[in-house]
Image: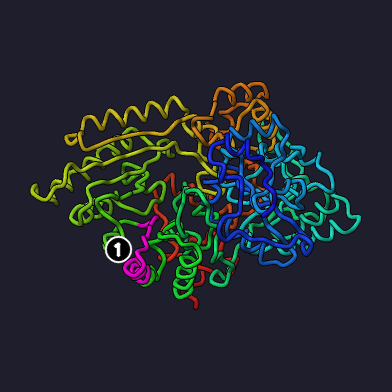
Amino acid sequence: MSKLALPERILMNIDKPARYIGNEVNIVKKDLSNIDIRIAMCFPDVYEIGMSYLGLQILYDMFNKREDTYCERVFSPWPDLDKIMREENIKLFTLETQSPIMDMDMLGITIQYEMCYTNILQILDLSGMPLYAKDRTKGMPIVIGGGPCTVNPEPIADFFDLFYLGEGETSYDELLELIKVYKSTDMDKEEFLKQASKVPGIYVPSMYIVNYNQNGTVKEITTKYDDIPKVVKRQVVTDFSQVTYPLAPVVPYIKATQDRVVLEIMRGCIRGCRFCQAGMIYRPTRQKDVEMLKKYARAMLDNTGYEEISLSSLSSSDYENLDELLNYLISLKDEDHVNVSLPSLRIDSFSLDVMSKVQDIKKSSLTFAAEAGTQRLRNVINKGITEEDILNGSRQAFIGGWDKVKLYFMLGLPTETDQDLLGIAELAEKISEEYFDAVPKEKRNGRVMINASASYFVPKPFTPFQWAPMILPEEFTRRAYYVKDSFMQQKNKKSLKFTYHDAYISILEGVLARGDRRLCKTIYDVYKKGAIFDAWTEFFDMDKYKDTFTENNVDIEFYTAREREISEILPWDHLDAGVSKKFLINEWEKAKNETVTPNCRMNCSGCGSAIYGGGVCFETKN
C-alpha cells in the first residue's frame, strides 16, 4: 500500500480516520507505469454518504475496466480534517494511491444535490487548484461534473471545465481519448474545450455566452464559436441489460449510509409525477433482464460479504419481473440469511405480501408518499394514487400485522389551499380509523402510530412545475402550523404525529435549482466566508447566505417566488434533458386544470424520450 497522505498524529485526532486511508475490500490497484489517464472520482460530501451512491461505484468500475485508465476516489474531508489540512497546507488526495488531486488528469465530481455546491469549492480549494475554471491552465486536472444537477449547472458553471449530461456509460470513452490527445500534443486548453464540446453529452459552459434583459431574465444564450452545438443533449443508455455494472463494489471499513448490496433493477419511472425531476430526466423507463439480476445478486453477495441486498429504482413495483426476482431473493434469505430491502414500493396487496415475507414487521413501518392531502391536489401533481388506494393499502397492512405508518407530504404545491392542508390531517385520521376498524382489540399490539411529515415544495428544471412559484418561508410556516393544529383536532390525535422540515434550506435549494450564472459569485463569496456541508443542518447558516445575497444584489424572491412565463428563456434552455418543452408546457396546463396523465404503460403521453429508441416507449412494439 502507498504511504498514507495523513501522518498518524493527525489520524489519531480526527473523527473516523478510516474515511481517509483507503485500502478497502475490492479496491482497485494498478501499476501506474502502464496508465495513460488518471481520474479522481469525487463525491462532494462525507465518505459515508459518497460510498452509498451507486453511480460512483458504477463509474469507478467502468473506468477501471480500461487498461489505460486508473480511477481513484476522493470525498469531502469532514470539518475537523478540513481545518487541519488548511493549517498544515496538506493537499487533498485520493484514497487508492494517496496521491494529490493535482497529479490527476481529470477530476470528476458527482453533483447529486444543490446543497453540496460549496463543498465542490472545498474540493478544488484543498486540492490547490484555482476555483474558477478560467484560471486553470493546461497540466491541471480537467474538472468535469455529472449527475442530476447538470440539467441546470449554471449556478456553478464558472467553476467547471465540462459537464457530462446524462448516463456515464455512453460518451466517456470518446472524451478520455480526447484527453489523451490533449496531454500528448501541443493542443491548448481552449482548443481542447472546443473539441470536447462536440462530444455527445458534453457541455462546456465557457463555450456559451449568456445575456440578460433589464428585468433580470435571460435575453439570449449564444455560442462562442459557430461550430459549437446550439443545444447539448442528455445521453441515455438504451441497451440497459448489457451495460457495465460493479459486481465487486468497494466495501467500506466503516458503516456507510447504505451498508448493503445495491441491485439496480430499472432506470426511469412510468408514473410522471409533475414535481419529480428524477421521474422526468431519467426517461425512458428501462428494465434489466431478471436472469441477469439473479446472477448479479449472487455474485455481489459473494464478493462483498454483505448480509443485506436492496433493490434500486424510482418505483420498484413497476418492474415487470419483480415477483420472480423477489422469490429468488427470498430463497437467498432462507438459505444464506440475507435480508432483502424493498424501497419504492407502491402499497398494494402484492407488495404487502412480499414485505411480510422479507421484513420483520415488528420493527418496520409502512411508508406512503401521498404528497398531498386531497385527491384534487394529487390530481394536480399527477401522483397516480387515490385515497382509496391509501386506505385499502393501510387496512391490508394493519390486518397483516403492521401498526406504524409513515406519510410524506409537500407543502406549497401549485394551487394548494387550506382545504388541501386540512386534508393531510383528515387523511391521517382516516388511516388510524382503518386500524381500529380492521384489527380486533385483543389483537392490537400497543397503539397504532401514524407519523406524517411535510417538506417544502421546490420546483425543479425539466419538470412541468419549472415555471411555478415557491411560497415564501413565512407562508410555509403558517401552513405547517395550520396542519399541526388540524392534527390536534382529530379524534385519534394521540395516534397521530406531524413534523415539518426546515424552510430556509429549501429556499436556498430553490434559488440554486433554477438559478443562473450570476449566482457563481455568490457561491464563491459564501464559501470564502466558511460555508461548507450546507446539506447538514448543524453546519448550515442561512444568515451567511442572506448577507452574501445582499452584498451581490441578488433578489432571492426573483429565483423562488415568481411564476415564470411560458415564453421566458430559462437558464437551462440550451440543454436538452430528453423531455420536450412542448410536453412540459402541456403538463403544466393539465396541472392547472387538475387533469391526470396516465402512466407510460397505459398510454404514451408523447414526452419526447422515444427518440432514444429504447425502453418502455417500445415495449409494445417488440
Rendered position, 594 above or below 128: below
Which residue is depicted at the point 61% across and 30% down?
531
Residue extent of the magenta highlight:
326-345
**Farthest residue toward the left?**
442
Farthest-out residue, bottom: 622
* Residue at x 57% of width, y 47% of height: 112
Q: Where residue 454 sits in the image (x, y, percent)?
A: 38, 37
The residue drawn where x is 56% and y is 38% is 115
| Closer to us: 128 or 114 | 128
Q: Which residue is at the front of the view, 103 or 537?
A: 103
**Left or right: 140 in relation to 146:** right
> The residue under label 1 is which amino acid type?
Val
Q: Tell me if I can see residue 523 in this picture.
A: yes
**Residue 342 colored in magenta in the image:** yes
**582 to the left or right of 145:** left
Task: Indicate whether 268 appears above or below 122.
Answer: below
Q: Which residue is mark 1?
A: 354
In this rendering, position of residue 558 left or right of residue 471: right
Q: Is residue 248 magenta?
A: no
Residues packed near mark 1 inside 10 Å, few (<14), some (14 to 19) or many (20 plus): some
Q: Position of residue 499 (x, y in %)?
A: 34, 34
Q: Position of residue 146 (x, y in %)?
A: 64, 51
Residue 561, image x and y in percent?
Answer: 52, 31
- Number of numbered discs visible in the structure rendering: 1
Residue nearer the viewer, 187 or 423: 187
